C-alpha cells in the first residue's frame, strides 16, 4: 500500500457490518434501509433487463433518459437549469462522483476544506488525488451540530482550492441553513474557490429544515459541482446510481476522470432511476414523513436507554454521546455493543482527523423497519 493510502485500512462500515453478521446483532451501523425502494421502480429495472436496455455498455455520460430526468428534477425541485447533454454526468454512486471530482479538480498539494466529522471516503479520495485535507469541525450545541463560519473563513489559505461541503450532513444530521450556505457561497466567490457539494440526503430533511443546493446562490453555478445519488432517496443503495451536475466545463473535467475509473455502470438500473426521479411529490413527502417518525422512534429509544441525543434535522442517522454511560472510547464501545446488547453502531471518532475530538460520539441509523427499531430500543435499555 502506498504512503498516500497507508492510513486507510478497512472502512468502518465494512468492519461494523461484518460484526453485525458474525454476532447476529441488529445492524444500525452502515446506512442502508432494510426495506427496498418502490415496487414500480424495481419493475422498471426488470423491464429494462428483459427489453435489453442497458445490458451492454451505456453511453459514457449516462443514458439520455436518466440525464433528462436528473435535469428535470433539478429544475422542478430547485429551479436549477442544466443541459442534460452537457451538464449532467451519471456515476457509479455518489462515491465515484466524489472520487472523480477530486481527481479531476485537484493539483498535488492543493488544500481541501471539509466539514468534520466527514464521510470517510472524503479523506481517502483527497489523499488519492494528492490533496491536503483541512478539517473545519462542527461543534455540538443544544440544537445539534453547528458550523462556526469564522473558523471556516480562517481555514482558507492561499493553497485552498476547494470546499467539500456535505448537507444534509452525515454523520451529524445537520442541515446547513440558507444563511450559512449564503456565507459559504460568499466566501467561495471572494476567495475564488471551487465547491464540491455532496447532497445525497437532499430529500431527507425534517421539521423546519430545508435543503437548498449551494449551486443556487449568486456566483455559485459556475464554481460548484453538485453530487447526488439514488441510493438514499429511493432506497436502492446496491444499485450505485449517482450523478454530477454543473457547468459543461466542470462536468467535462469530472467526466475525464470518471472515464478511467469505471467508464460506465449499472446500465438497466439507470432506466429505472429515471422513472424514480419522475415519481410524484407524494412519494418524496411520504418517504420523508416516514423517516421523521422513525427518527423520533429511535431517538426516544436512545434517550430512554441513557444516551445523550443530538437531534438530527436531516439524513437517516442520529449521533449520540456515550459519556452518560461513563464511556469515553466510541470505537471500543461499538466493538463491545453487540455482545452487551445485540446492536451495532458506528463510532464517529473515525470521521475526525483527531479521533479525540469525536471520542464519545456514536452514530445509529434509523432507516429500518419499525419492529426492528422497537427491538433495538428494548435491547439498548440493557445498557443501563
Ligand atoms: N456521501 C455521503 C455523505 C454518504 O453518506 C454516502 C453513502 N452512504 C455517499 C456519499 C455514497 O453514496 P453512494 O452509495 O451513492 O455511492
Ligand atoms: N454512506 C453509508 C453510511 O454512512 C455507508 C456507505 C458505505 O458503506 N460506504 O453509513
Image (tube, rainbow, N blue to C red):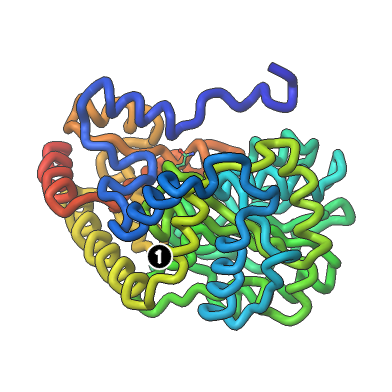
236 to 77, vertically: above or below: above
| Closer to the camera in the image, 41 or 221 | 41
Q: Is residue 367 left or right of residue 269?
A: left
Res. 352 in view: no
x 60%, y 68%: residue: 68
| Residue that carries the numbered disc 1 in the rendered image | 204
155 to 353, vertically: above or below: below
Could you tell me how many numbered marks the image carries?
1
Which quadrant: the N terminus?
top right
Q: Residue furthest top?
A: 1
Rendering coords of residue 254 (x, y %): 75, 51
Give the image quarter of residue 206.
bottom left
Rendering coords of residue 38 (x, y %): 31, 59
Asked which secondary structure carries label 1, the reply is loop
Mark 1, Cα crowd under 10 Å, few <14 / some 14-19 / many 20+, is many
Rendering coords of residue 326 (x, y %): 28, 38
Amino acid at each position: 500500500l502506498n504512503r498516500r493510502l497507508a492510513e486507510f485500512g478497512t472502512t468502518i462500515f465494512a468492519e461494523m457490518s461484518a460484526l453485525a453478521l458474525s454476532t447476529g446483532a441488529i445492524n444500525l451501523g452502515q446506512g442502508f434501509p432494510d426495506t427496498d425502494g418502490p415496487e414500480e421502480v424495481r419493475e422498471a429495472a426488470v423491464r429494462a433487463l428483459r427489453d435489453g436496455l442497458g445490458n451492454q455498455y451505456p453511453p459514457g455520460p449516462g443514458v439520455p433518459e436518466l440525464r433528462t430526468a436528473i435535469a428535470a428534477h433539478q429544475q422542478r425541485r430547485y429551479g436549477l437549469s442544466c443541459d442534460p447533454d452537457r451538464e449532467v454526468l451519471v456515476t457509479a454512486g455518489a462515491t465515484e462522483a466524489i472520487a472523480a471530482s477530486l481527481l479531476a479538480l485537484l493539483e498535488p498539494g492543493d488544500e481541501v476544506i471539509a466539514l468534520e466529522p466527514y464521510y470517510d471516503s472524503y479523506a481517502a479520495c483527497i489523499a488519492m488525488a494528492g490533496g491536503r485535507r483541512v478539517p473545519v469541525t462542527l461543534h455540538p450545541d443544544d440544537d445539534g451540530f453547528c458550523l462556526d463560519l469564522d473558523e471556516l473563513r480562517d481555514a482558507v489559505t492561499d493553497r485552498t482550492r476547494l470546499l467539500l461541503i456535505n448537507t444534509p450532513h452525515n454523520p451529524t444530521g445537520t442541515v446547513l441553513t440558507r444563511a450559512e450556505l449564503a456565507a459559504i457561497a460568499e466566501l467561495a466567490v471572494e476567495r475564488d474557490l471551487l465547491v464540491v457539494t455532496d447532497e445525497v440526503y437532499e430529500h431527507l430533511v425534517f421539521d423546519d429544515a430545508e435543503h437548498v443546493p449551494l449551486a443556487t446562490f449568486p456566483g455559485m453555478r459556475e464554481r460548484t459541482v453538485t453530487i447526488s445519488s439514488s441510493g438514499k432517496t429511493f432506497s436502492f443503495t446496491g444499485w450505485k446510481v449517482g450523478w454530477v451536475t454543473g457547468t459543461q466545463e466542470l462536468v467535462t473535467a469530472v467526466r475525464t476522470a470518471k472515464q478511467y475509473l469505471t467508464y460506465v455502470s449499472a446500465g438497466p438500473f439507470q432506466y429505472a432511476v429515471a422513472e424514480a426521479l419522475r415519481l410524484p411529490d407524494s412519494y418524496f413527502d411520504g418517504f420523508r414523513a416516514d423517516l421523521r417518525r422513525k427518527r423520533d422512534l429511535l431517538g426516544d429509544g436512545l434517550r430512554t436507554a441513557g444516551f445523550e441525543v443530538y437531534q438530527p434535522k436531516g439524513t437517516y442517522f442520529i449521533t449520540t454521546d456515550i459519556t452518560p454511560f461513563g464511556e469515553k472510547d466510541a470505537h471500543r464501545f461499538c466493538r463491545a455493543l453487540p455482545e452487551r446488547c445485540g446492536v451495532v453502531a458506528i463510532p464517529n471518532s473515525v470521521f475526525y482527523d483527531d479521533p479525540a475530538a469525536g471520542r464519545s460520539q456514536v452514530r445509529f441509523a434509523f432507516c429500518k423497519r419499525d419492529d426492528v427499531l422497537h427491538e433495538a430500543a428494548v435491547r439498548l435499555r440493557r445498557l443501563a
